Image (tube, rainbow, N blue to C red):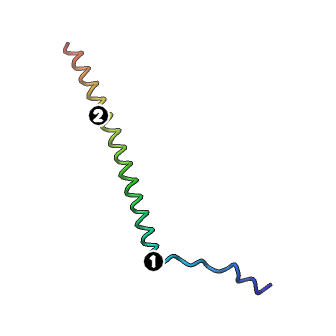
Amino acid sequence: MSSFQGAGAEKPEKPSLLKRALAFLILALVVVIAVRILFNIIAAVFWIIVGVAAVIAVLWALKTLL
């Protein structure tokens, strides 16, 4: 039984430094793209709100003047 103790206890090999660096770069790129998409969505919602507010302001001004 003592001959089987080390059979399952082997540590898996770590990926090479190049593979780890490539994986880090891919993750960083995905994070940057996700943040830019999120920022653009927030900016689009902001400009839609500004546009709606401008239309409401024009309608109010016309109603007040006419």
Instruction: Tell me the quadrant of the picture where the C terminus can be found.
Output: top left
Q: Quadrant of residue 33?
A: bottom left
Residue drawn where x is 59% and y is 77% of the image: 12
In this rendering, position of residue 20 left or right of residue 37: right
> Does 63 sit above or below residue 33?
above
Q: In the displayed structure, does residue 3 sit left or right of residue 49?
A: right
Name the residue type under label 1: Leu
Q: Which dot, 2 or 1, sits closer to the camera?
A: 1
Tell me which amino acid carries mark 2. Answer: Val
Residue at 32% over, 35% down: 48
| Along the viewing direction, whichever of 65 and 10 lies nearer the viewer | 10
Which residue is under mark 2? 50
Q: Earlier in the sequence, mark 2 or mark 1?
A: 1
| Image mark for residue 56 | none
- As helix, strand or loop, the secondary structure at mark 2 comes to helix
Disc marking residue 17:
1
View extreme (top): residue: 66
Image quarter for residue 52?
Answer: top left
| Label 2 packing within 10 angstroms: few (<14), some (14-19), many (20+) | few
User: What x and y, as percent, mark residue 65?
Assistant: 19, 15
